[in-house]
Amino acid sequence: MKTYLFDFDGTLVDSMPTFVAVMLRILDENGVQYGDNIVKIITPLGYKGTAEYFQTLGVKLPVDELLKTMHRYAQKEYAENIVAKPNVIEVLNTLKQRGDSLNVLTASPHEMLDCCLKRLGIFDVFDNVWSCDDFQTTKANPEIYKSAAQRLGKRVEDIVFLDDNFNALRTAKTAGMTVYGVYDPSSDEYKTEIENLSDKYIEDFSALL
């Protein structure tokens, strides 16, 4: 029996284009310049962390105002359109039947996360569905992984963490977790870094079986 901790965006569901489009739209609307590495920076930060980061780039709006705009732009997509990545649903159901513990830890807020998982019919396969909001920190902080392990009643090193983002994987590994890199087109340019860092690298969820 294994204990898995899954990222959501870009790992379980094909939502990274939506997340990125929403965030870049806000920067563009506010006339703020950004570098080529913007996606790598904001992905592990989640919505609140990204809003705070955008302020450092020069967005003048308060954080709560930014969050409202982000949520408004993204909500409809999560509720109606975003799909699971190939083989994810089948593999999760098989792992669950096998007796593995399945859990989610994501930067996305519950208002997007929960409705999407329920629509896809996989909300109930998870023992825990956590947003970073539940820990009041981001996946850029090693403590979030240690706190998740405590809540699961497991040693950090006995948990397999899966993510498509290099920074999140590196931080989880620093915290002591076993890390599996998951391929997503949004992380294409960091594929080699992710492969080198990961204990295992999967291009398709069927590799977990």
Image: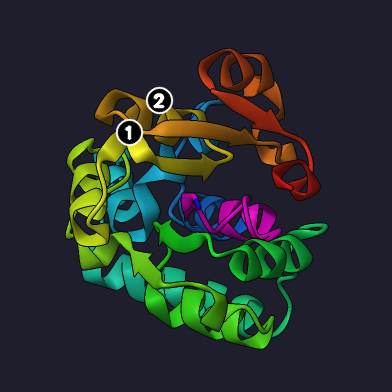
Residue 64 position in % (x across, y down)? 23, 71
Scheme by which the image is coloured = rainbow
Residue 105 at x, y percent in the picture? 40, 57
| 6 drawn magenta | yes
Give residue 170's mark: 2
| Amino acid, disc 1 | Glu
The amino acid type found where label 2 is placed reads Arg
- State left or right for residue 207 relative to residue 133: right
| Pointer 1 with pointer 2, Cβ within 8 A | no
Residue nearer the viewer, 138 or 76: 138
Question: Percent position (x, y) of residue 54?
Answer: 33, 46
Disc 1 marks which residue? Answer: 157
Q: Secondary structure at mark 2?
A: helix
**Residue 88 in picture, x, y percent from top left:** 73, 60
Q: Earlier in the sequence, mark 1 or mark 2?
A: 1
User: Residue at the location (39% across, 77% down)?
Assistant: 110
Question: Please, what secondary structure does the residue beneath circle 1 have?
Answer: helix
Tell me if mark 2 has few (under 14), some (14-19) or many (20+) residues whose alpha carbon lies within 10 angstroms of its own.
many
Q: Is residue 42 above or below residue 94?
A: above
Q: CA distance from mark 1 to mark 2?
A: 14 Å
Tell me which residue sits at (17%, 41%) in the image.
Answer: 143
Instruction: Identify the residue at horizontal 48%, vertical 81% (top origin).
Output: 114
Q: Is residue 19 rendered magenta in the image? A: yes
Q: Quadrant of residue 118?
A: bottom right
Q: Is residue 61 visible?
A: no
Q: Which residues make up the magenta segment?
A: 2-20
Residue 22 vs 82, above or below: the answer is above
Mark 1 or 2, which is nearer the eye? 1
Query: Toward which corner of the image does residue 60 lie, by quadrant?
Result: bottom left
Q: Would you say 198 lies left or right of 144 here? A: right
Report if residue 126 is visible in the image.
yes
Taking the spot 43% from the left edge, 64% from the top edge, the residue there is 108
